[in-house]
């Protein structure tokens, strides 16, 4: 599973990943909502399986929050795949993934 870090991360094996870098996730790692961007189909599936934790009460109009603007030599662009509400007026309908890799997995309960 390959991801791009949107914020600095520590993986479950203790590996530090700097925001803006791509990495191969270790076995059993659960991707965090809005902390990484899945780059391969198996990563998208793991991201979808983890679900949109914390998104139910989030403002859907707020930008994805990262620490990419901190002092660093790496640019951190916006995610290519992100959780979007199925219907912003009906949060009980859940969220679906945007992007070319995540758009076909259907809605996920909040």
Image (tube, grey):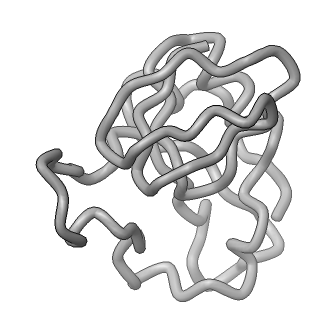
Q: Position of residue 50 (x, y in %)?
A: 81, 42
Please identify the quadrant where the N terminus is shown.
top right
Relative depth, front residue between 97 and 17: 17
Could you tell me if residue 106 is visible in this image? no
Q: Is residue 5 above or below residue 104?
A: below
Please identify the quadrant where the C terminus is shown.
bottom right
Q: Position of residue 16 (x, y in %)?
A: 56, 40
Determine which quarter of the picture holds residue 42: top right
Q: Is residue 64 above or below residue 23?
A: below
Judged left or right of residue 98, residue 89 is right
Q: Residue at x 65, y 21 (%)?
A: 25
Q: Residue at x 59, y 65 (%)?
A: 85
Could you tell me if residue 8 is visible in this image? yes
Relative depth, front residue between 68 and 92: 68
Q: Position of residue 57 (x, y in %)?
A: 71, 87
Q: How many marks?
A: 0
Q: Residue at x 75, y 73 (%)?
A: 54
Judged left or right of residue 78, residue 71 is left
Q: Is residue 71 above or below residue 91?
A: above
């Amino acid at each position: 599973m390959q991801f791009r870090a949107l914020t600095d991360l520590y993986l479950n094996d203790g590996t530090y990943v700097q925001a803006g870098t791509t990495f191969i996730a270790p076995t059993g790692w659960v991707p965090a909502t809005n902390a990484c961007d899945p780059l391969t189909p198996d990563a998208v599936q793991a991201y979808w399986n983890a679900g949109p934790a914390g998104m139910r009460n989030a403002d859907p109009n707020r930008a994805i929050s990262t620490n990419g603007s901190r002092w660093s030599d790496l640019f951190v662009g916006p995610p290519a795949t992100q959780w979007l509400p199925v219907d912003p007026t009906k949060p009980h309908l859940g969220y679906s993934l945007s992007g070319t890799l995540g758009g076909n997995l259907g809605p996920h309960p909040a």
